[in-house]
C-alpha cells in the first residue's frame, strides 16, 4: 500500500483519482495526453444494451464556472465497447469501471450480466438518471424504492464485481437514496451526477440547449457535491462514497476525502485541458506533503465538525 | 499493446511570439493574428487547435477552437476575430504571454491540383496554410465574402499568391447577392474540388448549391466544442446515415453530401 492507494468496497486503486463517466470518452481519446496507468481508474462513457443516438444539438453550453449538457447518453452499445474499446485499455494496470445506463430494472440486470463477466472490468457504476416511464416519468434516481430495485438487480448479476450506484443530486434527501442503494447491495455510492439546469439566449429567446434543460457540472457544483458526500457519510458511515463534482485541483481531491469520500472522479475539468486528470493524479502526493497529510486513510472523514449541539444546516 | 503515449506531450504550455491587430486597440469584430511558439508536430491545413488563455480561470472551463492558419512544426499562426469573451481575452494578450494549446486536431482539407476556395470572413484562416503548402497553387482560386475592410483579414497576403475575388457585405441587405455569387461559384466549379470555410449560413448556402449541381465540396464546420478530443460528444453533427458524428475528430472538414446541417 502506498500513501495514496485506496481500498474500499472490494476494490484496490493505486490512487483515488478516477475520471468521470461521459467526460473521458472510452479513455482511448486521452492516450496522447497522458499515461492512463497513472490514473487510479477511469469510468467509461455510459453504456446501454443497444446503441443510442443521443439528443439533438446544441447539446452543450458553457456557463459560469461550469457547463450544461444534454448529450442523451449517445453510445455505440455495450457490445461495441467490449469488442472495440476495452481491449485497447491498460485494464490490468488501471481500474476500468463500466457505467451502466438503462430504463428498466431488467435491462440493468442484462447489462450487469454482460459487464460483470468481463475480466477487464473492475467495477460497475449504475447511472439511475433515466426517466422511469412505466412508473410515471420521474427518474429512477428520485425514488428510493427504484434505486433499491435497480441496485439489487445489478448486484445479483454482476458476479464478483463491486457495484457503485451513482446518485442524482436532484432529490431532497440524498441520504435516503444512498440508504436505498446500500439496502439493494451496492458496494459504494458515487455522488453526484449533474444538477438539472437551463440557459437562455436573450437575443433569439430560445433555450441554449435543444433539449431545453440539461445537467450542470463543473466547479459551480462542487459545494453541493461536497455537502452531499458529507451528509451520506454522516448518515451511513460504513458505506463508501466516490465523490464527484467540480474537482479541479489536488486540494479539491483532499477536500472530498476529508468529507468522507474514498475516491473521487474528475469530470468537466478534463475539458479545461486534456491532461488535467493526469496532473491531479501525479500532483496528489506533493499536495499531501504541503498540507502535512501522511496518508489518505488518516485524512478520510477527519473533518473537524463543530460540537454536536450546534445546529448544522 | 495499448498506446499509452507520452505524458502530457500533446498539451503545450506555449508562448505567444507576436500578436498583431489592425489598430491600436482591438475592438468588437476586429481581427488579429497571433504567432504561437508551439511544437505541435506535423499538421495539415483544415486541422485546428484548442486554445485556452491564461486569464480563463475556473469560471470559463472550455478552451476555444481555432483553425491553424499557417506555420511550421515549431510555430503556428492563428487568425482570430474578436467576437466574444474568449476571443477578446485572447486579443488583450501580449508577446511573451503563456497560453495553453493542444492539437493538431481533426481532419484536414483534401488536396487536389485544382480547387475553388470559398471563404466567409475569418473562415479564410485555414486557406493561408492550404495555399502556401499547395504543390500547384496555380490551380487555385478564391471567392472571399467579408465585411469591410478586407485588409484586416490579411487578405493581401493571399492575393499575392492566387486570384482572389472579393465580395463585400456592407449591410445585411447585401447577403442575398453574396449568396447568389457563392452559388454561381459552386456551379462554375464543374469537376473541380470546392472547399468552404465560414459561418454556418454561408456553409449552408455552399452545401445546398453543391447538392443541387452535384459539385464535390468539403465544408469546415464551426460547431461548439468543449473537449476538442472526441470525449464529450457535445460537438456532433447529424450524418445522412448513421449516428451523429464528432466534428472535432471526424471533422471539422466534411463532404457536403454526408452531413445534415439542420441543427447547426
Ligand atoms: C474547427 C473550428 C475552427 C475555427 N477557426 C477559427 C479561426 O481560425 N478564427 C476565428 O476567429 N474563429 C474560428 N472559429 C470560431 C471560434 O472558435 C469562435 O469564434 C470562438 O470560440 C468564440 O469564442 P468567444 O468566447 O469569443 O465567444 P462566445 O460567444 O462568448 O463563446 C461562447 C461559447 O460558444 C462557442 N462559440 C461561439 N461562437 C462559435 C463559433 N463560431 N464556432 C464555434 N464555437 C463558437 C465558444 O467556443 C464558447 O464555448 C473556429 C471554430 C471551429 C469549431
Ligand atoms: C458532457 C458530459 C457527459 C456526461 N455523461 C455521463 C454519463 O454518460 N453517465 C454518467 O453517469 N454521468 C455522466 N456525466 C456526469 C459526470 O460523470 C459527473 O457526474 C458530473 O459531470 C459532475 O462532475 P464534474 O463537475 O466534475 O463534471 C456527464 C457529464 C458531462 C459534462
Ligand atoms: S468537442 Fe468534445 S467530442 Fe468534440
Image (cartoon, rainbow, N blue to C red):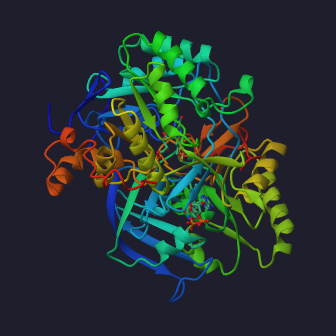
Q: Quadrant of residue A301?
A: top left
Query: In the image, what residue occupies the spot 81% across and 48% down?
Result: B208
Query: In the image, what residue occupies the spot 28% across and 52% down?
Result: A250
Query: In the image, what residue occupies the spot 47% across and 72% down?
Result: B90
List x then y, in percent, for residue A235.
41, 36
Closest to the observer, A74 or B134: A74
From what the image shows, is residue B102 above or below residue B142? above
Q: Is residue B229 left or right of residue A292?
A: right
Q: Is residue A197 visible?
A: yes
List x then y, in percent, for residue A229.
41, 42
Closest to the observer, B218 or B251: B251
List x then y, in percent, for residue B160.
56, 72
Query: In the image, what residue occupies the spot 75% across and 29% down?
Result: A136
Q: Is residue B76 left or right of residue B163?
A: left
Q: Is residue A45 visible?
A: no
List x then y, in percent, for residue A182.
44, 24
From what the image shows, is residue A37 above or below residue B34? above
Q: Which quarter shows the N terminus of chain B?
A: top left
Amino acid at each position: 500500500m502506498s500513501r495514496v492507494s485506496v481500498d474500499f468496497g472490494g476494490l484496490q486503486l493505486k490512487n483515488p483519482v478516477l475520471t468521470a463517466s461521459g467526460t473521458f470518452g472510452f479513455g482511448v481519446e486521452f492516450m496522447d495526453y497522458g499515461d492512463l496507468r497513472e490514473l487510479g481508474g477511469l469510468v467509461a462513457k455510459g453504456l446501454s444494451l443497444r446503441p443510442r443516438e443521443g439528443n439533438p444539438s446544441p447539446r452543450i453550453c458553457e456557463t459560469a464556472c461550469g457547463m450544461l449538457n444534454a448529450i442523451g447518453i449517445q453510445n455505440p452499445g455495450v457490445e461495441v465497447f467490449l469488442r472495440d474499446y476495452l481491449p485497447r485499455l491498460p485494464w490490468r494496470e488501471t481500474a476500468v469501471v463500466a457505467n451502466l445506463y438503462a430504463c428498466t430494472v431488467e435491462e440493468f440486470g442484462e447489462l450487469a450480466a454482460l459487464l460483470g463477466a468481463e475480466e477487464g472490468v473492475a467495477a460497475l457504476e449504475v447511472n439511475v438518471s433515466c426517466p422511469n416511464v412505466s412508473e410515471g416519468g420521474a427518474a429512477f434516481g428520485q425514488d428510493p424504492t427504484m434505486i433499491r430495485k435497480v441496485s439489487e438487480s445489478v448486484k445479483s448479476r454482476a458476479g464478483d464485481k463491486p457495484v457503485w450506484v451513482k446518485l442524482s443530486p436532484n432529490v431532497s434527501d440524498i441520504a435516503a437514496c444512498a440508504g436505498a442503494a446500500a439496502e439493494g447491495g451496492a458496494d459504494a455510492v458515487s455522488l453526484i451526477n449533474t444538477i438539472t439546469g437551463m440557459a437562455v439566449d436573450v437575443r433569439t429567446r430560445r433555450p441554449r440547449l435543444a433539449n431545453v434543460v440539461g445537467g450542470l457540472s463543473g466547479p459551480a457544483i462542487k459545494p453541493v457535491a461536497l455537502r452531499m458526500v458529507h451528509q451520506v457519510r454522516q448518515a451511513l458511515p460504513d458505506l463508501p462514497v466516490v465523490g464527484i463534482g467540480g474537482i479541479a485541483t489536488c486540494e479539491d481531491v483532499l477536500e472530498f476525502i476529508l468529507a468522507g469520500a474514498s475516491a473521487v472522479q474528475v469530470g468537466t475539468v478534463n475539458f479545461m485541458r486534456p491532461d488535467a486528470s493526469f496532473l491531479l493524479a501525479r500532483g496528489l502526493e506533493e499536495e499531501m506533503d504541503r498540507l502535512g497529510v501522511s496518508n489518505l486513510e488518516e485524512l478520510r472523514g477527519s473533518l473537524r465538525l463543530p460540537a454536536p449541539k450546534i445546529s448544522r444546516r | 499493446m495499448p498506446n499509452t503515449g507520452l505524458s502530457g506531450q500533446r498539451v503545450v504550455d506555449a508562448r505567444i511570439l507576436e500578436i498583431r491587430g489592425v489598430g491600436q486597440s482591438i475592438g468588437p469584430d476586429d481581427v488579429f493574428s497571433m504567432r504561437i511558439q508551439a511544437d505541435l508536430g506535423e499538421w495539415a491545413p483544415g486541422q485546428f487547435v484548442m486554445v485556452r488563455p491564461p486569464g480563463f480561470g475556473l469560471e470559463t472551463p472550455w478552451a476555444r477552437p481555432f483553425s491553424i492558419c499557417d506555420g511550421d512544426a515549431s510555430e503556428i499562426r492563428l487568425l482570430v476575430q474578436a467576437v466574444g469573451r474568449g476571443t477578446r481575452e485572447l486579443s488583450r494578450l501580449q508577446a511573451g504571454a503563456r497560453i495553453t494549446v493542444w492539437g493538431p486536431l481533426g481532419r484536414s482539407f483534401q488536396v487536389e491540383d485544382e480547387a475553388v476556395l470559398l471563404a466567409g470572413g475569418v473562415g479564410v484562416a485555414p486557406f493561408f496554410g492550404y495555399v502556401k503548402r499547395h504543390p500547384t497553387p496555380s490551380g487555385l482560386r478564391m471567392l472571399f465574402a467579408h465585411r469591410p475592410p478586407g485588409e484586416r483579414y490579411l487578405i493581401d497576403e493571399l492575393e499575392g499568391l492566387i486570384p482572389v475575388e472579393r465580395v463585400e457585405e456592407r449591410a445585411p441587405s447585401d447577403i442575398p447577392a453574396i449568396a447568389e455569387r457563392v452559388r454561381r461559384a459552386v456551379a462554375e466549379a464543374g469537376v473541380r474540388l470546392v472547399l468552404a470555410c465560414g459561418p454556418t449560413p454561408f456553409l449552408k448556402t455552399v452545401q445546398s448549391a453543391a447538392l443541387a449541381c452535384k459539385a464535390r465540396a468539403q465544408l469546415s464546420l464551426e460547431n461548439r466544442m468543449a473537449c476538442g478530443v472526441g470525449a464529450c460528444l457535445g460537438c456532433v453533427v447529424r450524418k445522412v446515415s448513421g449516428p451523429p458524428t464528432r466534428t472535432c475528430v471526424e471533422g471539422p472538414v466534411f463532404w457536403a453530401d454526408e452531413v445534415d446541417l439542420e441543427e447547426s
